[in-house]
Image (cartoon, rainbow, N blue to C red):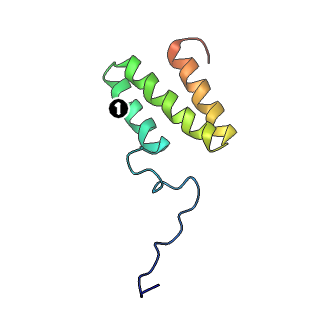
Amino acid sequence: MFGVKAPPEKPIGSSTDSPNKKSPEDLIDEARQVLSKGDVQTALQKLEEAGRIYQERKDEGRYQEMQRTIAVIKGKGK
């Protein structure tokens, strides 16, 4: 209407639907960086957030991978 184009629709779960949220991949990268500096607690928080994002996206495989990684860091898994 009036020659103004509507913005293109964004796919559900796209990285643009919440610009303030980091992607799970970014969170995992950050977790690796802080873990290499010995900050286990922050690394776990970032991995748990990445896991929540995967769970929200219904990406069960990646969610389980995050749970296994968290368990290994906590010393409760292999």
Furthest toward the bottom, the residue is 3
Mark 1 Cα shell of 10 Å, populated few (<14), some (14-19), many (≥20): few
Residue underneath mark 1? 33
x and y, in percent, of residue 68 in the image: 61, 25
What residue appears at the point 61 percent right and 16 percent down from the top-left corner?
77
Left or right of 34? Residue 51 is: right
Above or below for 5 versus 9: below
Left or right of 75? Residue 45 is: left
Above or below for 14 versus 65: below
- The answer to which of 12 and 61 lies nearer the viewer is 12
x and y, in percent, of residue 17 in the image: 48, 54
The count of marks equals: 1
What residue appears at the point 60 percent right and 26 percent down from the top-left corner?
67
What residue appears at the point 57 percent right and 30 percent down from the top-left corner?
66
Furthest toward the top, the residue is 75
x and y, in percent, of residue 40 in the image: 40, 18
Quarter of the image with the C terminus in it: top right
- The answer to which of 36 and 52 lies nearer the viewer is 52
Quarter of the view holding residue 2: bottom left
Quarter of the view holding residue 59: top right
Element on which disc 1 rests = helix
What residue appears at the point 54 percent right and 22 percent down from the top-left corner?
70
Q: Amino acid at mark 1?
A: Gln
